[in-house]
Image: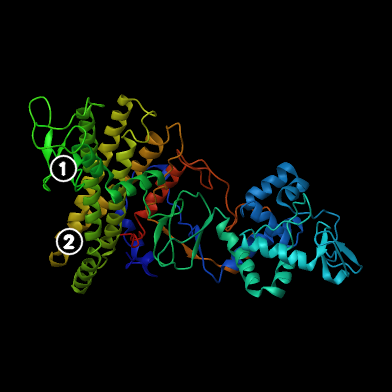
Amino acid sequence: MDDCFSGDDDEEYYCSDRDSLNGLENEDSEYDWVPPKGPSTKVITKESLLSAQRGDLRRVMDLLSLREHHARTLLIHHRWDVEKLLAVLVEKGKACLFADAGVPLTEDQDLSFPKQSSSTIMCDICIEELPGHLTTRMDCSHCFCNDCWTEHFVVKINDGQSKRIKCMAHKCNAICDEAVVRDLVRRRHPDLADKFERFLLESYIEDNKMVKWCPSTPHCGNAIRIEEDECCEVECSCGLQFCFSCLSEAHSPCSCLMWELWSKKCRDESETVNWITVHTKPCPKCHKPVEKNGGCNLVSCICGQAFCWLCGGATGRDHTWSNIAGHSCGRYKEDQEQKSERAKRDLYRYMHYHNRYKAHLDSFKLENKLRETIQEKVSVSEEKESALRDFTWVTNGLYRLFRSRRVLLYSYPFAFYMFGEELFKDEMTTEQREIKQHLFEDQQQQLEANVERLSKFLEEPFDEYDEKKVMDVRMHVINLSVVTDTLCRKMYECIENDLLGCLLLGTHNIAPYKSKGIERAAALNAKADESDKCLPLDFGKAGASEPDRPSGSGSLDDGGRSSRKRARKEGLVGALIDLNVPAGGY
């Protein structure tokens, strides 16, 4: 679903209604308006991948006075986490940092140490004595013939170990110089050398927890780099919105595990299958499910086969009060009635949440068609001779409707697992579960009512109204936009603090709520990015990945505020600027 309202005019388009929103927000010092920051996510294309990698490389090279090969070895070992690398340097020292990563370089070693020897050398691998120009010495001082090195490199590259090829010497953990590997392999296997270079380049994405490939199909070729928490939702330049943590569609306020379970349940209709399993028996002849509609335990399939309902075994057609002809199945092995009732209850509960999830999903799809209608209405209204010339409140309300509807949509799968017994059976007592469920459902109901009202007013034919009635619709849309934003924010606060935040197992984290919608990643500015990263120990610059932060009950932003407070500040800005229309996930 493309953002057909995005463009260079968005900032002017949204700021014009700021005066009309005055007084609608709570007057709280925590809502001081803060100018919006630039995008914290970057799009890395095939062209900018090398520049993005060199930024981190140069930062480590300048800090530790290393060659590029050794800097890359350190970064690959620490999964391209510069902050983690620097923390190990401070905590354990340079010698331990190098030893753990397989970097043999010492402080007093000459960086121009020759790789090739000028004398005759015995190769300990093939046990042959060769002239020096046919041998190569690595930084760890081990020297072998070029043929043995080449075969070693070829085997490692084909085995997928090209990013960290160790020296052949016994118990030597030193990583071989990539320039030597590239040069020796290219002489015999040019294609394999290109593959080696590609592996080194893509290690910045494959081994970097802050960078992931866009999961678009067909693949757009882009990768996304984030600067903050891994638990977030992003939008690639190709238009796809996805969860950065699990790479599935954006699903907040569902956690990744909840959404995975819900998707599987909807995909294979496991609850329906469960009910059919309990209430029917397969015919022993045609294997079709047969439902019992009478009291007699001798049942007949439409294919004509008679069988015993108790055990499913094929029987004759004659029976008495005490037995079935030619058959005896013994005793019951479990309480079939209790099992049947439990299956019915689970199915009805699943259908309750699924029906509401499906209803909001259908509304979400239909409301996306409003965009074209809204554009036509705005065009007609602007052509009229009226004092009201600014219709940005319509597009603001439309974006708010999309964002709020999406929150409602995924709140039902969240509630299904949050208040069920599948994930949190031992985390809450029955009384605690009921109290929390009532609290959440009250907020969900309020949000749902206001979203439906907002949808109703946006569908009004305001292009046919007089000026007074248009002003009335305008104020309703503006008020409801602010109210739904506030309710969404409060629902996320409830989830983060009162529901997920108090769990013993903090495995269910959700992406923070952003009033502006899912952030669209900006193209990586390679030159600016590299210049920033060259500054050693500058933890605040863009491009340096930040350390992990706890996010069960709210993570901390740059100012030390919790994600809950950060979301509230963003909520005020979001009432004034545009939202991203969710990209085509459906």
State the mark number for residue 290. Answer: 1
Q: Say which residue appears at 72% left-offset and 65% top-offset.
A: 151
The secondary structure type at the circle numbered 1 is strand
Closer to the camera in the image, 275 or 475: 275
Q: Quadrant of the C terminus?
A: bottom left
State the mark number for residue 470. Answer: 2
Could you say where residue 298 lies in the image, as x and y percent from the top left? 12, 34
Q: Say which residue appears at 44% left-offset and 51% top-offset.
A: 246
Could you say where residue 451 lies in the image, as x and y percent from the top left? 23, 50
Pick whichever of labels 1 and 2 is earlier in the sequence.
1
172 over 271 or under it: above or below: below
* Amino acid marked by disc 2: Val
Q: Quadrant of the N terminus?
A: bottom left
Q: Give left or right: position of 449 versus 23.
A: left
Closer to the camera in the image, 460 or 203: 203
Q: Say which residue appears at 24% left-offset and 46% top-offset.
A: 354
Could you say where residue 110 lies in the image, as x and y percent from the top left? 85, 61
